[in-house]
Structure formats: structure tokens, C-alpha cells
Image: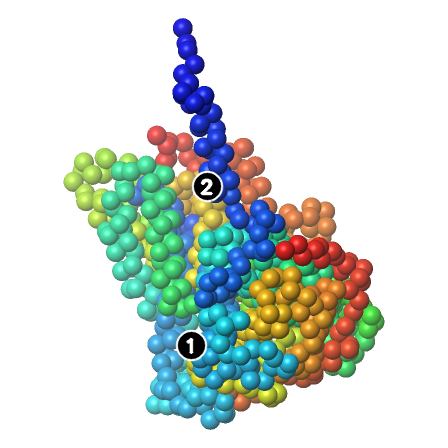
């Protein structure tokens, strides 16, 4: 029972990240018709916003390290600690949550530059060309990040007070050994909040209404004299923010490296396809569903019956769903189809 | 009506084409396929330089480790050519090195990127042998890569001095006449860690293994199981995880209720950083199971990886081939030389690569020839000291170095930013030695044919 509860939580957590990335992918595909393979790179750039912010907060004074006698070595003491003592140390401790403030404008800017600077020239090209150019862009971004930050994962811990795990077993009357990290619970809540905010924005604002109308029938909306293209550019920026925030908040769970985006990208594409191309609720539902299935497939009891199932479950489910429902879980006839 | 058009001398167009293509194919064929016609591959006797091939991961998850290996190789080349302070060339015993290159020829090098993939590593090693004329290939950071490149070198008749590779297979079932490993292996890690785990955690323990699903992971899991079960420990489960899984939470949560009180992470590099970080996040280190404190063990430690894991590494046991904090003359000479050049101490990967380069050069000087068969003869059974690990021997039967093994622990109170690992025990060579024909380890070296 405990194990099932924990794996459900794990799945929801992982699903939260998948859903956030898939949501952005679907938004871009639904509005601009572009298959954006650089979307994983946006997740990675978000994660590196947190790393950069942490680096800025820990800008340090070099002091000769007297403990090293073999050669001249220097240790670094952050200026914030020199100037503000414990307050400075506390600010550094909260680097990851605070970096959201930096990530939002930075990711919006990156999204707009990416769309205006490159992707807009590929709207009329074939999907194959779009995939090639965005995939190439992703590799370029990865290599730039690697040249600045190296290839090793960079530790970006959660603030000390929420770095441990909560004894949720005792909260809900199950066994005491049922613990779950605070930060993962925060991530799940954060993912739900961001998803809710995106849906509310699309559902309850005029801007969102136009975007939804544009997703359904771009020509008609344009004929009504509405500048759809400009709105879609902003949608690209929003998708970049969503992916970026997913990346920022994921850093305490997984120390980021330059390749972290690619690791999520392929799975997120499967999530989009399973959810139904162009369907935002589908992307979210499929994200959580596949996250949970992946977690359950990793249980020893399941693996003893189907060895290696944990590594193929997502693709297996994708095959089955596409056989039964070729348009995906919530895909509708006529949407994103010629 | 067709008519065969023939040349006055009897050649037809077709026969000219056939002969031409045949000749071109022979001329273009890699030299090592026809090496028996020559003395040996890439004989540098007629030139004034010798070229070494450094095949390290320059991209991919181990790129930082590869960069450190490359730094060490460049330093070794410098020292061999008589530049710099000489590093461990001054402490190596016995030494035939003169500081004037190798047999008087200036040492040059080419580099290749293994990408931590066997096929890419083989392709770059092949290029260095065929196009650049490398007389020796060295490098590492993955056992899968090392085994693949070693067998290519055997076919090519070029010596392979393995860098960081820890799987038993490299000098076990996949051993080769042309391959030599200075780095230790999982069998030695198990033998060294066993007694320390017993004295720290007792005999009544239940272990749960998470294992990277490839040759090194299996080898590591097997060795630790063997030595901990001999102590009386039970193995609760051994779960294979895909290489580069990223999020290990779904593999860690079952540990919580498994009844195990020790988690053994048979992971390396990025996987180790991630699985350890997440295991700590799930509160495993604060847990009490069966009335005992829950413990985590990471059998193969690296300082570079310890940096990635940050605070989580503190207090955790593991083993390592070498650490920069060793105070013997050889280690100090190397750390001083490397630190002066780059501003930080070398990693264990850098150390083994530096030592391998010097050992190879020294064997050529001692043999008085570049011929690999002569060099192999010197290296087999070669005993040396002053290279940071105490008295060491290249065992002739499997080309594995035997020396003391370090058991280390993540430092609770580091005295400097580099002081991440504390040496808790230096396990003497005699305690980690085993038979070259041990079950599951025995292999066939093959022959030297040059």
C-alpha cells in the first residue's frame, strides 16, 4: 500500500514535469504549426537560469587558500556573505526559488528572440525542415551552455528548511516509513498552479480567446482583422516561460547539466502524441498518466513479471493508444489534420 | 551487333577497370590488415618524432573527466620531452627515462573524442592509428569503451594503455596481449571495502543494490555482493537501472519499505550524482531500519563526481585508485607539478593516465625498441614504485596492475575546497590480490605477432 502510494506521488511529480513541457510543445504546435525540437533546450535554459542566478549570488572574492601548500590555490568567499553575513547566506540558500524572478523575463526574451530570429522563417516549410532546424538549434544551445558551465551536473540544492523529506505516513495514518521530499511536493503543486494559470489565461482573457480561435481556424481569425501572428509570437514566449519554470524548479530534484533538456524532450513528444496533437488538456492528462505508469513499471514486483518493462512502458502505451485511438486520448477530428 | 573493343596489348576496358579498382582497394586498405608484411604498425624509427594517441571523452557526460585526463597527458608529454619540473619522472623507480623524448625522439600527440560510446571511440582510435600514425592509444572513462578500443588495438598491433576503466572484464575475460591497465577494478574495490564495511556497520546488514545496467555495473554489483555476503550480509534486491536514467526516484522509493538497511549505489559519474542526491532527498540517511542507522555505500568514488554531489557525499564510504592528498613523494611531485600548471589538484583519472604514459615510455626506453612485442615483454611483470600507489606490479598473466587500494569517505569537515575525500584505510596489495584464472575472470590474452 505504502509502495503504491509513493509510486503514485513519484508519477505525479514526474508527470508534472512532462505535462509542463508537453503543454508548451502543444501550445507552439497548435498555434504556429511548428514541431519545436528546441523546446527541451528551453527547459534546460530555465534550469541554467537557476544555476546562473546561484552563480550571481555567490560571486566571490578570491582568497589564497592557505591549506594548500603544494601550489597556489584560491578559495572563494561570496561577497553577499562578506557584506551581509547570515542574511547574505540566507539569500544564497534561497537561490532556486528566487531565480524564478529572473527566469520569467529571461525566458520570455529567449522565446521571443528564438521565434522572431529563426523559427518564423520556417512556418511555411515542411515539418521535416522544422525538425532539422530546431534540433540543430537545440544542439547549438547545448554546446554554448556546455562551454560556459562544463558537462558535469551542477548542484543546485533546495533551501535548507525544505531540503529534507516529510513524514507523510504519519499525517495520513499510514506507516511511519512513508516519507516524501518536501521539494517534490512543492514541484507538484507548482506544476498544477502553472498549468492552472495557463488554462485560466487561455479561457478567461480576450487574448486567450483569440489564441484559441486562432488554433481552431487561423485564416478566419486573420480575416477578421486580428493580428494573429503577433499573438502567436507571444504564445511562443509564454511556452518558453512555462518550459523555463519547469526547468528552474526541477534543479533541486536533478542537478542540471547541458543535456537535461534532451532527456525530457523525446518523452514529452510521446506525451503530446498520446494526449492528442493540439489538445492542451490531452497533453496535461497524458503527462500525468505516463509519469504514473512509468513509476509503477519500475516497481520490483512488476519488473519481476516483465523484465525491462520500466524502460519501454511509455512507448508501449503510446503504441497501444495510437492503435486504439489514432488521434490520441483527447485529439479531435479535424484538428491539426490536413 | 556488338563487338568487344580491345586495346592493342590485349587489355579490355573491363579488365583495366577491374585491375585498377583492385589496386586502388589494396592501396587504400588499412595498413594494419597487412601488418605482418612489415615489422610492426607505425614504426617511427625513420622519423624524428613519435605520436601518441589520447582517446578521451571530450563530449558527453564524462567530458569534464576527459578534460582532466587530457591535461594529465599533456603534462606527461611535457615531462617526457624534458620540459617543466619533471613531475613523477623524478620519483619513478626504476626508471630508464631521460627527459629527451622517447629513444631520443620528440613526443607528439593527437587527440580523439570517445563521446563515451564504443563505436565513436573505436572510430577515433582507428583514425589515430591509420591517419596519424599513433604508436600507442590511451584513454578511458568507461569500461565499455575500454574493452572495445582494446580489442581494436589488438587487431591493429598497437599497444593500448587503459585510462579510467574499473570493470573486471577489461583485464578479465576481455584481456588482451596489447592492453594494460594501471587502474584498479571492482574485485579490488570489493576486497578493500569489505573489511571497512564490517568494522563500521557490523555483520548483520541487509543490502539493496541499484546498479547501472552495463558491463561495469554488473561487475561492481557482483564484487560487492561477493564480499558483503561473505561477511554475513544479506542481499535484499539488486535492481538494474538504465544508464543515464536521470530521475531515480522510482527506483529509490521501493528501498524505503524493502527492509534493507544499506543502499549500495553501483553508479558512476552523472548517475552517481543523481541517485545519491535523490537517495538523500528521500531521507534515507536519516532513516532507522532494523534498529540500525540506514547507510549508503558508493563503491567507486571520484573527486570530480564528489564535487557534483555537493554536501550529499559527506560520510559515505567508497574506494578510489588514488587521491591527491596522499603524502608519498611521487604523489606530492605529481600534485605540485599539475597544480602549478592548472591551479587545482589532479583527479584519479588524471593520475592513472599520467602514470600510464610514463610507464609506456619507460618500457620503450628499457626495451630499446618501439616494437610492441619488446615493449610488452618489459611491461609484463614490471615492478615499480614512486608513482603514488607504493610498490606496484604489472601482473604478466592478465596485464592488471596490483597495488594498495584506498578506501575513502566523503569528508565531513574538509580543510580546503578540494579536500572532499578522506582516506580511511590503505588496503595492502596482498589483501586485494586474486588468481588470474578466477571463475568469471579468466580470459585469453592472445599473442603478440609483430
Question: Looking at the image, which residue is at 40% across and 50% down?
Answer: A23
Q: Please provide percent x and percent y for residue B389.
A: 65, 80
Q: Please provide percent x and percent y for residue A314.
A: 56, 46
Residue in the foreground of this view, choosing between A306 and B87: B87
Chain letter for mark 2: A
Could you tell me which quadrant the N terminus of chain B lies in?
Answer: top left
Quarter assignment of residue B219 = bottom right
**Disc 2 element:** helix
Question: Looking at the image, which residue is at 57% across and 52% down?
Answer: B38
Q: Are marks 2 and 1 on the same chain?
A: yes
* Inter-mark Cα distance, 2 to 1: 37 Å
Residue A255, which numbered label?
none
Residue B267 visible in the shown view: no
**Disc 1 element:** loop
Could you tell me which quadrant the C terminus of chain B lies in?
Answer: bottom right
In the shown orientation, is residue B392 left or right of residue B57? right
Chain letter for mark 1: A
Which class describes the residues within 10 Å of circle 1: few (<14), some (14-19), or many (20+)?
Answer: some
Question: Looking at the image, which residue is at 52% across and 47% down?
Answer: B30
Residue in the foreground of this view, choosing between B285 and B315: B315
Mark 1 or mark 2, which is nearer the start of the sequence? 1
In the shown orientation, is residue A168 left or right of residue B18? right
In the shown orientation, is residue B197 left or right of residue B270? right
Quarter assignment of residue B144 = bottom right
Residue A273, which numbered label?
2
Q: Which residue is mark 1?
A: A94
Which class describes the residues within 10 Å of circle 2: few (<14), some (14-19), or many (20+)?
Answer: many
Residue B324 visible in the shown view: yes
Residue in the foreground of this view, choosing between A139 and A23: A139
Amino acid at each position: 500500500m505504502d509502495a503504491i502510494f509513493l509510486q503514485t506521488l513519484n508519477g505525479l511529480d514526474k508527470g508534472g514535469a512532462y505535462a509542463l513541457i508537453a503543454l508548451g510543445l502543444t501550445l507552439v504546435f497548435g498555434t504556429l504549426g511548428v514541431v519545436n525540437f528546441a523546446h527541451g533546450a528551453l527547459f534546460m535554459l530555465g534550469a541554467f537560469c537557476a544555476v546562473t542566478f546561484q552563480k550571481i549570488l555567490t560571486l566571490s572574492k578570491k582568497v589564497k587558500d592557505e591549506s594548500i601548500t603544494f601550489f597556489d590555490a584560491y578559495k572563494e568567499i561570496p561577497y553577499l556573505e562578506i557584506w551581509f553575513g547570515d542574511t547574505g547566506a540566507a539569500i544564497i540558500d534561497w537561490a532556486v526559488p528566487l531565480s524564478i524572478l529572473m527566469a520569467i523575463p529571461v525566458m520570455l526574451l529567449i522565446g521571443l528572440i528564438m521565434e522572431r530570429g529563426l523559427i518564423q522563417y520556417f512556418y511555411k516549410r515542411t515539418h521535416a525542415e522544422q525538425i532539422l532546424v530546431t534540433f540543430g538549434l537545440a544542439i547549438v544551445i547545448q554546446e554554448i551552455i556546455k562551454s560556459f558551465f562544463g558537462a558535469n551536473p551542477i548542484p543546485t540544492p533546495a533551501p535548507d528548511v525544505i531540503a529534507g523529506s516529510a513524514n507523510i505516513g504519519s499525517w495520513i495514518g499510514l506507516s511511519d516509513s512513508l516519507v516524501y521530499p518536501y521539494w517534490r511536493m512543492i514541484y507538484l503543486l507548482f506544476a498544477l498552479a502553472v498549468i492552472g494559470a495557463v488554462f485560466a489565461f487561455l479561457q478567461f482573457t480576450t487574448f486567450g480567446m483569440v489564441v484559441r480561435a486562432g488554433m481552431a481556424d487561423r485564416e478566419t481569425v486573420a480575416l477578421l482583422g486580428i493580428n494573429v501572428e503577433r499573438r502567436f509570437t507571444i504564445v511562443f514566449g509564454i511556452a518558453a516561460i512555462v518550459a523555463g519554470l519547469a526547468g528552474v524548479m526541477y534543479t533541486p530534484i536533478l542537478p542540471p547539466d547541458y543535456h537535461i533538456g534532451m532527456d525530457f524532450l523525446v518523452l514529452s513528444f510521446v506525451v503530446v502524441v498520446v494526449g492528442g496533437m493540439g489538445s492542451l488538456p490531452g497533453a496535461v492528462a497524458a503527462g500525468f498518466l505516463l509519469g504514473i505508469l512509468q513509476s509503477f513499471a519500475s516497481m520490483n514486483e512488476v519488473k519481476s513479471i516483465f523484465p525491462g518493462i520500466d524502460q519501454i512502458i511509455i512507448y508501449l502505451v503510446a503504441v497501444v493508444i495510437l492503435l486504439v485511438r489514432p488521434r490520441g486520448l483527447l485529439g479531435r477530428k479535424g484538428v491539426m489534420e490536413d | 551487333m556488338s563487338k568487344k573493343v580491345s586495346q592493342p596489348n590485349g587489355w579490355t576496358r573491363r579488365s583495366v577497370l577491374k585491375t585498377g579498382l583492385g589496386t586502388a582497394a589494396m592501396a587504400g586498405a588499412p595498413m594494419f590488415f597487412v601488418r605482418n608484411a612489415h615489422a610492426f604498425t607505425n614504426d617511427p624509427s625513420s622519423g624524428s618524432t613519435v605520436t601518441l594517441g589520447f582517446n578521451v571523452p571530450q563530449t558527453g557526460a564524462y567530458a569534464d573527466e576527459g578534460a582532466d585526463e587530457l591535461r594529465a597527458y599533456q603534462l606527461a608529454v611535457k615531462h617526457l620531452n624534458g620540459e617543466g619540473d619533471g613531475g613523477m619522472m623524478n620519483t619513478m623507480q626504476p626508471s630508464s627515462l631521460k627527459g629527451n623524448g622517447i629513444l631520443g625522439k620528440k613526443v607528439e600527440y593527437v587527440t580523439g573524442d570517445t563521446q563515451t560510446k564504443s563505436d565513436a571511440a573505436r572510430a577515433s582510435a582507428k583514425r589515430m592509428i591509420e591517419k596519424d600514425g599513433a604508436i600507442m592509444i590511451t584513454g578511458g572513462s568507461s569500461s565499455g569503451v575500454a574493452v572495445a578500443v582494446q580489442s581494436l588495438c589488438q587487431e591493429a598491433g598497437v599497444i593500448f594503455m587503459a585510462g579510467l576503466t574499473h570493470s573486471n572484464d577489461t583485464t578479465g575475460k576481455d584481456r588482451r596481449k596489447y592492453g594494460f591497465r594501471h587502474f584498479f577494478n571492482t574485485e579490488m574495490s570489493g576486497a578493500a571495502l569489505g573489511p571497512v564495511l564490517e568494522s563500521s556497520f557490523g555483520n548483520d546488514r541487509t543490502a539493496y543494490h541499484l546498479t547501472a545496467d552495463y558491463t561495469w555495473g554488473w561487475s561492481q554489483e557482483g564484487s560487492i555482493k561477493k564480499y558483503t555476503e561473505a561477511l554475513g550480509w544479506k542481499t535484499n534486491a539488486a535492481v538494474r537501472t538504465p544508464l543515464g536514467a536521470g530521475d531515480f526516484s522510482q527506483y529509490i522509493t521501493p528501498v524505503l519499505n524493502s527492509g534493507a538497511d544499506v543502499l549500495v549505489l553501483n553508479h558512476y559519474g552523472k548517475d552517481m550524482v543523481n541517485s545519491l542526491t535523490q537517495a538523500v532527498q528521500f531521507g534515507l540517511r536519516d532513516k532507522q531500519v532494523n534498529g540500525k542507522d540506514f547507510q549508503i555505500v558508493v563503491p567507486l568514488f571520484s573527486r570530480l563526481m564528489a564535487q557534483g554531489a555537493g554536501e550529499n557525499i559527506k560520510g559515505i564510504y567508497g574506494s578510489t585508485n588514488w587521491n591527491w592528498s596522499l603524502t608519498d613523494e611521487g604523489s606530492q611531485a605529481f600534485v605540485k607539478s599539475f597544480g602549478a600548471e592548472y591551479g587545482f589538484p589532479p583527479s584519479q583519472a588524471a593520475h592513472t593516465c599520467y602514470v600510464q604514459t610514463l610507464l609506456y615510455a619507460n618500457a620503450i626506453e628499457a626495451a630499446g625498441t618501439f616494437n610492441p612485442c619488446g615493449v610488452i615483454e618489459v611491461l609484463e611483470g614490471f615492478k615499480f614504485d614512486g608513482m603514488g600507489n607504493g610498490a606496484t606490479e604489472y601482473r604478466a598473466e592478465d596485464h592488471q596492475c596490483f597495488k594498495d587500494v584506498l578506501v575513502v569517505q566523503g569528508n565531513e569537515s574538509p580543510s580546503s575546497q578540494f579536500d572532499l575525500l578522506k582516506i580511511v584505510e590503505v588496503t595492502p596489495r596482498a589483501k586485494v590480490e586474486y588468481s588470474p584464472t578466477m571463475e568469471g575472470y579468466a580470459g585469453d590474452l592472445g599473442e603478440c605477432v609483430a
